[in-house]
Structures are given as structure tokens and as C-alpha cells.
Amino acid sequence: MITIASLPQEIIDQNAVFASHGDGSSQFLKSLRVVSRPFCYSATRILFQAVRLFQKKRSDSDLVKRDDIQALLELAQSGASRYIRVMRVHGDTFLKSSDPSEGVEVIGTVAKASRDYVRPRLERLELFEPDNLMLREVSHHAVAPIIAGLKYLTIWGCAGCPNSPEMRRILQSGESLRSVEWRNCSPSFEGPTGIVHPRAPLEHLILYCYNQIVISLDALSSTVRNARSTIRCLGLYPMRCHVDAAEEHAQELVRELTSCHLLHHVDVPLFPETPVVQQHAERVKSTIPPEDLCSEECCLDFWPRLGLIRLLIWDYKQARGYSGPEGDVIQNLVNQGLPH
């Protein structure tokens, strides 16, 4: 006789996934956990695959217990923390209105809950509005094993935070990172070791800041070289190179970018005053039919035409009468190869 308990685990997993997409799915999954051991496994894996942590504000001082931290600790004690794939620390967590010590407690709890991880381990970490104290805790050696196992790292930082050492330490620990997205920070990267761990199978690297990213061409070239066989998307904006950047370094960067066969999106302002980039753009321009140069269509979004796109940005702004923020929107659309 065929019963629910005799169903293959794959079928049970599919049923649990289907049930997780409807209204009231959370309560339904909780009910599934008491049906049988196989259903408990499937429902638990879905329920706890994404965990959010919030920090109480100082106005919430009457809250003695931290429900989210307590829940995470209970997950660790029950062994269910191994199901966590996505960890989000966000909200008003690290704004000035919060207690700074809370950030230390949150990361300490994450490290404690993840200490005995077995695969599947935590794959994605998302931090929103971290301050320097928070970044210092994330870059601590106790959290290094967690960072080393991450595949995806997303951080929305506070503008103007002088957090370059902590940022570099975190990125250099991510030996499994496939995607890094760091927004609203003011980083600085130097040296020949690259931005991310040299063995990381990096596919996407996005560093967008309010202020300019100060980066050495050595660091950028090393990053591209290390991820030559995997990199697909590279965005560093707005970027400012060191004033002493040598011409041979710029030429090396152009060679490295050209050698990345999977690279299809580049958003790197490559200092048009560099003769090497100008020469490359002119060579590409000579291969494009005149009717395409005069058309209203955007250039295709891949590296060989990047130099040409950069040279045409000013023409697009002038022709359409846009300036200021509107012109920046046009620039982003052209860079991304989108209709405008």
C-alpha cells in the first residue's frame, strides 16, 4: 500500500516547494513538519533557507529579548542552522539611532550559529547599512570561515564610511565568491594581489560608490587576470586611477579585459585621456559601418566597443540636450546597451 511516508524524497521536496509559493505558506510548512520525518526535512529546509536579523533601536530598550537572535541560536542548537542559505542583516540595524554594541552581538551570533556548519553551508550574505564597527566584526577571524564559503556577497554601506581595510579583508577571505556587489561605500584598493581572493571563481564584481573609487591599475589588472576564465560582469563606478598610473599598466589592463572571453558587461570609466584606450577605441570605431555610428541605436554591450561607447557619451548628451542627472541616466543606459 502506497502512503505519504513511502513517497520518494524528491517528490516530497517538490510538494514542499510548491506549497511554499502560496498564501499562508509559512504556516503550512510549519504544519508539514509534523507529518513525517521526510516532510519535516523538506519543510525545515525551505522555512529556514533565508534568515533576517534586525537590530532594535534605542527607543526599543524595553525589549529585553532579541527574538531574531534567540531564534537563530535555537536553530543552531537544533541543528537546523545548516539549512540557512541566505543571511540578511538589514533595516535600521546599524544607523546612528541604534546601539552600536548590537552590531557586535548580531555578528557574534551569526558566527556562533555557523560554527558547526556542514554542507549545504551559508551561500549568500547581505548586509544593509553597516557601520565601521559592523564591518570590523564581519572581517574578524572568527567569521572568516563563513566568508570563505560564501558564493554571493551583497553590502549596501553607509556613504563616507572609511572602511577600506575591513572591506579589503572581507573580499580577500572570499575564496568561493562568484558575485560581489558593494554599493554606497568609499573603498580604496591598491597593490598587485587583486580585489577579491585570487582563487575565487568570480563572475560578477560590482562596486558602485557615492564617491570615487580609488584603485590602482595593478589591483584591477590582477583581479581581471585571476578571474579571466569566469568573469562576466565588471562594474567599478565612479572610478579614479592613481595619478601616477603608468601607460604600460593601462595597456596591460586593456589586454587583460580583451582576453576575458565571457566578459559581456563592463562599466569602468577608463580615463579617456589614456592614449592606449583612445587608440583601441579608434581601431574599434574603424570596424563599425558609418550608418551604425550615426544611428540612434546603442552599441552592443560587450568589451570591444566599450572605448567607443565612452567616446560617444558626450555626443549623446549634447545631441539630446541633457545635462546633470539626466545626462547620467543617458550614460548608464548607453553603458548597459538599453533602449533610451
Image (tube, rainbow, N blue to C red):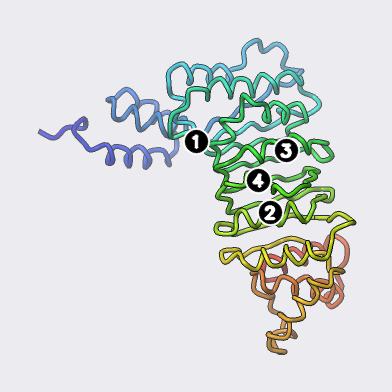
Three-letter code, disc 1? Arg
Q: If you read the primary sequence from the N terminus, does the residue marked by circle 2 or circle 1 appear first?
A: 1
Q: Describe residue 170's horizontal placement relative to residue 148 as left or right.
A: right
Q: Describe residue 150's horizontal placement relative to residue 43 as left or right.
A: right
Up/down of 228 relative to 308, above or below: above
Q: Which residue is disc 4 drawn over?
A: 196
Point out residue 59 in the picture as x, y percentages from the top left corner: 76, 18
Q: If you read the primary sequence from the N terminus, does the residue marked by circle 3 or circle 1 appear first?
A: 1
Q: If you read the primary sequence from the N terminus, does the residue marked by circle 3 or circle 2 appear first?
A: 3
Three-letter code, disc 4? Val
Three-letter code, disc 3? Met
Residue 85 is labelled as 1
Point out residue 93 in the picture as x, y percentages from the top left corner: 71, 28
Label 1 SS: loop
Q: If you read the primary sequence from the N terminus, does the residue marked by circle 4 or circle 2 appear first?
A: 4
Q: Which residue is disc 2 drawn over?
A: 222
Up/down of 32 relative to 314, above or below: above
Three-letter code, disc 2? Ser
Label 2 SS: helix
Up/down of 230 relative to 46, above or below: below
Mark 4 is surrounded, within 10 Å at the Cα level, by few (under 14), some (14 to 19) or many (20 or more) other residues, namely many
Label 3 SS: helix
Q: Which residue is disc 3 drawn over?
A: 167
